[in-house]
Image (tube, rainbow, N blue to C red):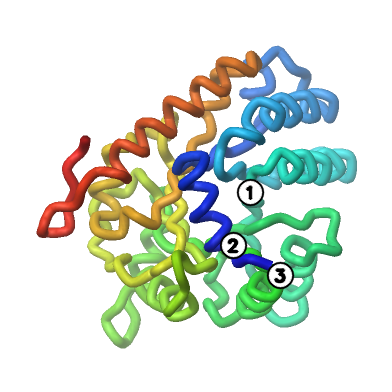
C-alpha cells in the first residue's frame, strides 16, 4: 500500500491544497434548516459528502459532533467515511486521541486498521502524554499506509501555557514535538506520513518547522479569522507541506451543493496562490 504521504501529495497536486471539515454543530444545522437530531446530522453529512467528496483533497469529519448522538451518530460517521472514500477523498478523522499502552493501541486499531468500520486515512492525536506514547498509532499507520497529525501549536489561547513552556534543553514543548515528528519523517519522499497541527491564526511562531518533511495541517482559516495570506507568516519556508483547512466558511455556503462546491473552489484558489508563489532568497514568498 502507498504511504499516506504519497497519497496526500498526489491528492493535493490533483485536487488542490484544501481540507474541508465536516463540523455539524447545532448552529450550523439550524442555519441549514435541519433538525438537531440524527436525521439532520445524516442529511448534513450526506450533502457535504456528495458536494465535495469528489472535489477536495481531504475531508475532515469532527468525530465529536457525530458522537454526541450516541451509537446512531457513530453509524452516520461510519457511513460518511465510506461515502467519502468511495468518492476518492482522503479522510482525516478529527479525534485528537492520546493515551498510553493498550489504550492508544486500541485507538490505533479503531481508526487506522482497515478491518475497522471507522478506518480512515489519517487521524489527529494529542502528544501530551509524551510523543512516544503515540508509538502504536505511528506503527499502525505505517503498517497500513495511514497518517497521524499531532497537535503542536494550536490557536486556542489556553494552549500556549503548555505548548510554549520550555524544557531543560531550552526547547519549547511544541518544538520538542516538532523535532520528534521530523525524525519519524526523515528520508521520506515526496512527503512523510506523520504530520503536525499548527493553527493558521497564531502568527509568527518562532518555531522551526523547516525539517518536518511531513504535512502541516493549518486549521483556523476563514470563519476563525485567518486568511490564506497568513500562511506565509506562520509557516515561512515550510509552506510546501501545508494543508490548509476550512470548515465554517465553506459549510456556511450550504445546503446548496453548487454553492458548497463554489466556496471550496474559491478557498482552494486562494490557498494555491500563496502556496505556489515563488520563494525569495530569504525563504519568504511573493504572491502571484
Q: Quadrant of the N terminus?
A: bottom right
Q: Which mark is residue 4?
A: 2
In the figure, residue 58 lies in which quadrant? top right
**Residue 158 visible in the shown view:** no
Q: Nearer the viewer, residue 122 or 247?
A: 122
Q: Residues within 10 Å of mark 3 (few under 14, many from 20)?
A: some
Numbered disc 1: secondary structure: strand
Contact flag, marks 1 and 2 (Cβ < 8 Å): yes
Q: Quadrant of the C terminus?
A: top left
Q: Is residue 277 left or right of residue 110?
A: left
Outermost residue, left direction?
281
Q: Earlier in the sequence, mark 1 or mark 3?
A: 1
Q: Work out how far the residue at label 1 is from the one at label 3, CA to CA, in angstroms.
A: 14 Å
Query: As displayed, is residue 190 above or below residue 30?
Result: below
Outermost residue, bottom direction?
168
> Which residue is identified by label 3?
144
Q: Earlier in the sequence, mark 1 or mark 2?
A: 2
Q: Earlier in the sequence, mark 3 or mark 2?
A: 2
Q: Which mark is residue 90?
A: 1
Query: As displayed, is residue 129 above or below residue 116?
Result: below
Q: Position of residue 239 (x, y in %)?
A: 31, 53
Numbered disc 3: secondary structure: helix
In the figure, residue 17 lies in which quadrant? top left
Amino acid at each position: 500500500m502507498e504511504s499516506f504521504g504519497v497519497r496526500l501529495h498526489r491528492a493535493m497536486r490533483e485536487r488542490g491544497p484544501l481540507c474541508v471539515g465536516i463540523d455539524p454543530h447545532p448552529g450550523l444545522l439550524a442555519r441549514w434548516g435541519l433538525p438537531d437530531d440524527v436525521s439532520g446530522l445524516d442529511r448534513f453529512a450526506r450533502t457535504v459528502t456528495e458536494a465535495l467528496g469528489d472535489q477536495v483533497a481531504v475531508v475532515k469529519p469532527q468525530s465529536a459532533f457525530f458522537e454526541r448522538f450516541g451509537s446512531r451518530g457513530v453509524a452516520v460517521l461510519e457511513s460518511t467515511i465510506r461515502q467519502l472514500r468511495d468518492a476518492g477523498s482522503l479522510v482525516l478523522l478529527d479525534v485528537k486521541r492520546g493515551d498510553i499502552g493498550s489504550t492508544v493501541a486500541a485507538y490505533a486499531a479503531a481508526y487506522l486498521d482497515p478491518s475497522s468500520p471507522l478506518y480512515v486515512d489519517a487521524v489527529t492525536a494529542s502528544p501530551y502524554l509524551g510523543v512516544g506514547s503515540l508509538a502504536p498509532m505511528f506503527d499502525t499507520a505505517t503498517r497500513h499506509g495511514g497518517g497521524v497529525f499531532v497537535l503542536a501549536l494550536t490557536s486556542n489561547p489556553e494552549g500556549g501555557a503548555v505548548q510554549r513552556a520550555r524544557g531543560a534543553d531550552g526547547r519549547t514543548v511544541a518544538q520538542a514535538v516538532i523535532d520528534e515528528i521530523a525524525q519519524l519523517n526523515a528520508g521520506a519522499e515526496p512527503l512523510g506520513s506523520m504530520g503536525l497541527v499548527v493553527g493558521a491564526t497564531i502568527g509568527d511562531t518562532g518555531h522551526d518547522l523547516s525539517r518536518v518533511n511531513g504535512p502541516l495541517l493549518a486549521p483556523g482559516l476563514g470563519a476563525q479569522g485567518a486568511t490564506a495570506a497568513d500562511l506565509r507568516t506562520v509557516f515561512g519556508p515550510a509552506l510546501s507541506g501545508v494543508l490548509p483547512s476550512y470548515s465554517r466558511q465553506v459549510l456556511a455556503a450550504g445546503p446548496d451543493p453548487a454553492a458548497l462546491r463554489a466556496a471550496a473552489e474559491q478557498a482552494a484558489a486562494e490557498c494555491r496562490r500563496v502556496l505556489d508563489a515563488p520563494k525569495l532568497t530569504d525563504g519568504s514568498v511573493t504572491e502571484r
